[in-house]
Image: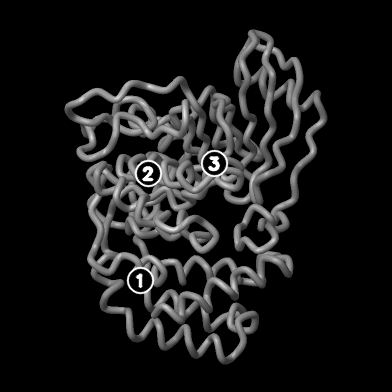
Amino acid sequence: MRDNRPVERYWERRHPFVELPPGVIDRLVARALPGERVVSSRPLTEGLRNTNYRLELGGGAAAVLRLYLADPEACGREAAILAAMAERLPVPRVLHSDATATPPFALLEWLDGLPLHEVLDAADAATVLDLAEVCGFALAQVHSMRFPAPGFFDRAMRVDRPMPAWAPTVLATLAGPAETRLGPELSVGVRRAVESNASLVDAVWSEAVLVHADYKPWNLLVGRAAKARTEPGPAAAPGFGPVPTGPAPGLGATRTSGAAVWQLTGVLDWEFACAGCRLIDFATFLRDEAVRPAGFAGAFADAYRAGGGSLPPEWRRLTRMVDLLNLLQLLDPLQPLDSRGTEDLRGLVAATVVMA
């Protein structure tokens, strides 16, 4: 089944992993956390952009050393976003961050949990739908943070660059090298899809909520706890601790599977976060919906609404349209892309054009 899944985690890295000698890691940690020592380190090679190491520290704690190689400016932005989200969702604490280093780096708290994509791949349909609900509710908490205008953040989490308009940006990206990878027939279909949906997308593209912009199963951690009793009365937030918006009507006390309660234990990798359209996160989370059980998108959306989020009437089609921009940007051959990635992206663009 995995070989047919159009998901980025099976693509080749776009930025080489940097091998650090143990002495370099020791010096970085000593500078960041005086008196702390590194017992052991191992590379975390699952990502496609940054270089990450898991560290075992002398006091028994674990941490992640994160080097911001793809986008050095992301170091300061991510630190600010993690601080802002600390009371809303399970995100790693920033133990130290140095946006002025070469390269910029951060030491982050290690969060325990299973990568969501691994759980989804092995789970039965009922468990997959439970997990979709947990993630949908959590996303509503992300989107509850609003900004005066859409755009990209500076290191203080202020919008300092406006979000470009959707249709002109899609067409400009298509007119570049990405068109070669799509071919003439599919490129014509993209242009038609943009023309017929531009006004609908414009109505939602002007939103300015906090968008994770990489809300994918491999950036989410989940875990199981002892099964909780379901008491009558108002339902609690499914799968993680208290959230500032209060209880979610219409959901069970927790999301359960057999004798276990599935909980969200980590929301990772906020380097792309911005103020923008909420459907950006729907697009990335549901990109491989076709290989999930029936009802996956519906369960995700229902829990999102129960958590306080709102969706436009044509959110399914609009989600696919919004994702066109990201798909075309990923096709840009200025960033190396393996044949598997190109094939996956062409398939996703073709499916979007059909839905348009």
Give the image quarter of residue 131.
top left
Q: Is residue 73 visible?
A: no
Amino acid type of disc 2?
A: Glu
Q: Say left or right for 261 vs 231.
A: right
- 177 up-or-down from 40: above or below: below
Mark 3 or 1, nearer chain start: 3
Q: Which residue is mark 3?
A: 116
The crowd level at tag 2 (other Cα within 10 Å; few <14, some 14-19, many 20+) is many
CA gap, disc 2 to disc 1? Answer: 20 Å
Q: Nearer the viewer, residue 209 or 70?
A: 209
Q: Say left or right for 44 vs 267.
A: right
Q: Give SS at disc 1.
A: helix
The figure's colour scheme reads: one colour
Mark 2 or 3, nearer chain start: 3
Image spot of residue 344 (x, y percent): 62, 68
Q: Which residue is mark 1?
A: 317
Mark 2 or 1, nearer chain start: 2
For the C terminus, the quadrant is: bottom left
Image spot of residue 273 (x, y percent): 43, 48
For the N terminus, the quadrant is: bottom right
Q: Nearer the viewer, mark 2 or mark 1?
A: 2
Q: Give SS at disc 3.
A: helix
Q: Is residue 258 visible?
A: yes
Image spot of residue 305 (x, y percent): 25, 49
Amino acid type of disc 3?
A: Leu
Amino acid type of disc 1?
A: Arg
Q: Give SS at disc 2.
A: helix
Residue occupying image coordinates x 56% and y 91%: 185
- 162 up-or-down from 235: above or below: below
Do the residues bearing badges 2 and 1 touch, measured as CB atoms within 8 Å? no
Q: Which residue is mark 2?
A: 133
